[in-house]
Amino acid sequence: MKRVFLFFLIIAGFNSAFSQSVETPSWAKETKEQKAKRLEWWRHDRFGMFIHWGIYALPARHEWVKHNERISNENYQKYFDNFDPDLYNPAEWAKKAKDAGMKYAVLTTKHHDGFCLWDSKYTDYKATNTSCGKDLIKPFVDAFRAEGIRVGFYYSLIDWHHPHFPYDRIHPNRPDDANELAKANEKRDIKIYQQYMKDQLTEILSNYGQIDELFLDFSYPGENGKGHKDWDSENLIKLIRSLQPQIIIDDRADLKNTTWGWDYVTPEQSIPKEWPSENGVRLPWEVCHTFSGSWGYYRDEHTWKSVHQLLSILIESVSKGGNLLLNVGPTARGTFDDRANDRLDGIAKWMKFHSRSIYGCTQAPDEYKVPEKCLLTYNPETKRLYLHLLEWTVPSLPGYADKIKYIQFLNDASEIRYSVTDNDVILTLPEQRPNVEIPVIELFLK
Ligand code: GLC
């Protein structure tokens, strides 16, 4: 009897957890079609550049250095005092992004350390007060737009500099003793910090024209953490939508149990096993990746991904219906370092001939089985399939035969002849593989 009651309680609890999903406020009402329209460019473009840049580029050992080394405000000040990106020329960044085939770029306007790249009225902790003395966002948006690249902003919800941001379990300067932490927080008023975020978001979303993506980062609810109540997320989203109605917003403001508090999901440094979905509905998603293990410039981090790995990540994301936001961490002089340029150049070389298998593409319909060591993307408009050969082996395509009109390599549009056995397509590939990082075979469907 007791057990039955317990079971009932668990189920009831479960239900109530789900039913707390907040009703759509009137300002957030949007039909599925309207949302699809808003996300159309983003779903098509697939590939963006993430840029993590701030005074953490000076220590050059991770953008979380203040947290990792528990650095006090006083000791962190030297990075502010010595910030002087004399070689900053975002036209060079934009050119690199454009050549690599990136269609949008998302810049960290403020990261967790609280340093702001623009001339915010609400803080002194900003680029204009460093030796560089200027707003770094304006030249960035101008340069990227001049290359036809859309502009997005990253804004950290977390702020390890603001005097009213309450200490929590990840704050670098938190007292370790729980009682002391609570006591120190008595002097911190999160309402003041909430207003600060609203004021700053109003600035960056009013002063730089149309902003296409907003990456709010991030929530960690639970004991000594922070979530939507701390950020006042509902009102943040309301404000953001009122300033930039078309903007696409990530899912890190802890409003995942609503349909209106986020637009897409954001796996990080991984590839989902399959297209992420909820209750059988496939979700828009964008994965972000670094070249190495760090987002901010990290001089002594040497585990850099190869061009082949990076391209595989891009292709695999598209093959599961997602986007890739690939990160560069510029140096404190304001340039991309050699390793980043080398990877971007490699990607550019491939994209020049293969972007057709990326833009406008998505997961192939289920009837097309993916051969081993291959990745498959599909363009539903042109009805073409793109078979990416991760290794130079001859794949056979099971059950494809009566669906195929023509087959060619994508890099040079040279015909690929094939034979058919039991409706399977057997390709006749040349002995010499095309001189490209990942060969792509374009299949024209009937
Ligand atoms: C994480 C990290 C952060 C990085 C971000 C990128 O949340 O805190 O440093 O900016 O991921 O997605």
Image: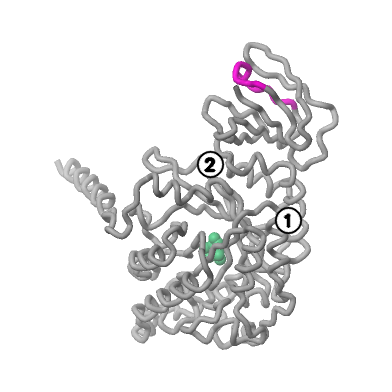
Q: Which residue is tagged 1?
A: 344
State how far apart marks 2 and 1 are (Cα): 23 Å
Name the quadrant containing residue 137.
bottom right
Q: Which residues are magenta?
A: 394-405
Residue 361 highlighted magenta (yes or no): no
User: Above or below — where is 312 with respect to 378?
Assistant: below
Q: Please, which residue is most extreme toward the right here?
A: 432
Q: Which residue is at a point 76% across and 25% down the rendered structure image?
A: 416
Q: Which residue is at a point 36% across and 78% down the rendered structure image?
A: 190
Q: Nearer the viewer, residue 355 or 222?
A: 355
Query: In which quadrant will I find the N terminus?
Result: top left
**From the viewer's perspective, is 318 left or right of 215?**
right
Query: In which quadrant will I find the C terminus?
Result: top right
Q: Which residue is tagged 2?
A: 321
Where residue 165 sits: x, y (%)? 42, 78
Q: Amino acid at mark 1?
A: Leu
**From the viewer's perspective, is 203 left or right of 398?**
left
Q: Which residue is at a point 47% across and 47% down the rendered structure image?
A: 284
User: Above or below — where is 300 with respect to 4?
Assistant: below
View quadrant of ligand 1? bottom right
**Residue 415 showing in the rendered view:** yes
Count of numbered circles on the image? 2
Q: Which residue is at a point 74% across and 51% down the rendered structure image?
A: 348
Q: Amino acid at mark 2?
A: Gly
Where residue 23 sits: x, y (%)? 26, 54
**Could you tell me which secondary element the residue under label 2 belongs to?**
loop
**Could you tell me which secondary element the residue under label 1 belongs to?**
helix
Q: Earlier in the sequence, mark 2 or mark 1?
A: 2
